[in-house]
Amino acid sequence: MPVPVASVKDQLPAAAPKSWPKPMSAEGYSPSNPGAFHVVFAPSADGSESFSSKLVADRAFAPGERLALLDNKSLAPVKAYSSVQFGNGPHDHLELNSDLLFMNHSCDPSAEMYLYAGAPERWEVLAGPRGLAEGQDITFFYPSTEWDMAQGFDCSCGAKVSTQQHTCLGRVYGAAHLTLEELEARGLVNEHIRAAKAEQAAAARAKGAANAVKTNGVANGVANGVH
């Protein structure tokens, strides 16, 4: 029987299995997954962390080909900009502890992060349906894992999903702020996000039904001369 998603956090180590000092610049940098991808750094003027750094492919990847297993993950102590959500509990967040941290968001992503329910040993990043070319930016759609992000941001990817006419979202907050159709138009929707969307939809239906009963009650009262 699969392990319930709620207990997956108990399977994750509190610290990264292998030490991974987060690189801040090209100086002394050693890729975590040589031959697969590397970070292109865009340091800020004051030498602090820049969110313009990116992850690029070292070689071509076929559609659906694995880029990496999440084999150095650990349980995140707190929800943060660097963490990835894997379930719907308050502490269901992991740290990647690898160069995968530098995958930027895109509304038309080149890769997908699969967080299979109850199977953290299988969690992986795969090339998207179009594959990846050598030197191409490796991106994923953040709301495919994130319900309500610790830090929303303005997206400038300019993406247009070819078959759906969906454009760049502009502002990205997480899956809670999108419809299921908007999520599916951009590729993978992980199981915990689907479950949260179903719960959100059920809550909205229940609220609508309660409001309808209340409205009907008021209308019937007025019709019967009750004020």
Image: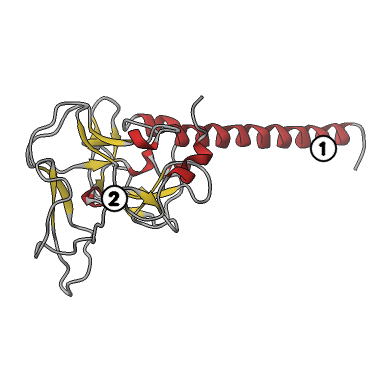
Q: Is residue 76 left or right of residue 155?
A: right
The residue closer to the viewer here, 173 or 2, is: 2
Give the crowd class for mark 1: few <14, some 14-19, many >=20 residues within 10 Å. some
Instruction: Determine the residue positioned at 23% across, 61% down.
Output: 21
Q: State the image coordinates of residue 178 (x, y, percent, origin top left).
A: 44, 39
Quadrant where the image shows the C terminus: top right
Colouring scheme applied when the structure was drawn:
secondary structure
Q: Is residue 23 left or right of residue 149?
A: left
Query: Furthest-right residue in view?
Result: 225
Instruction: Determine the residue positioned at 31% across, 30% down.
Output: 187
The residue closer to the viewer here, 182 or 136, is: 136
Q: Image quarter for residue 221?
A: top right
Instruction: Determine the residue positioned at 67% across, 33% down.
Output: 206
Q: Image quarter for residue 33?
A: top left
Q: State the image coordinates of residue 64 (x, y, percent, origin top left).
A: 22, 26
Instruction: Determine the residue positioned at 17% across, 52% down.
Output: 54
SS at mark 2 in the image: loop
From the viewer's perspective, is residue 218 above or below residue 77? above
Contact (CB < 8 A) between labels 2 and 1?
A: no
Q: State the image coordinates of residue 194 (x, y, percent, origin top left).
A: 47, 32
Q: Which residue is mark 1?
A: 218
Q: Which residue is mark 2?
A: 155
The three-letter code of the residue at mark 2 reads Cys
SS at mark 1 in the image: helix
Q: Is residue 9 left or right of residue 71?
A: right
Q: State the image coordinates of residue 136 (x, y, percent, origin top left).
A: 11, 41
First along the sequence among labels 2 and 1: 2
Task: Calculate the distance from the C-alpha at mark 2 to the C-alpha at mark 1.
Answer: 45 Å
The three-letter code of the residue at mark 1 reads Val
Give the crowd class for mark 2: few <14, some 14-19, many >=20 residues within 10 Å. some
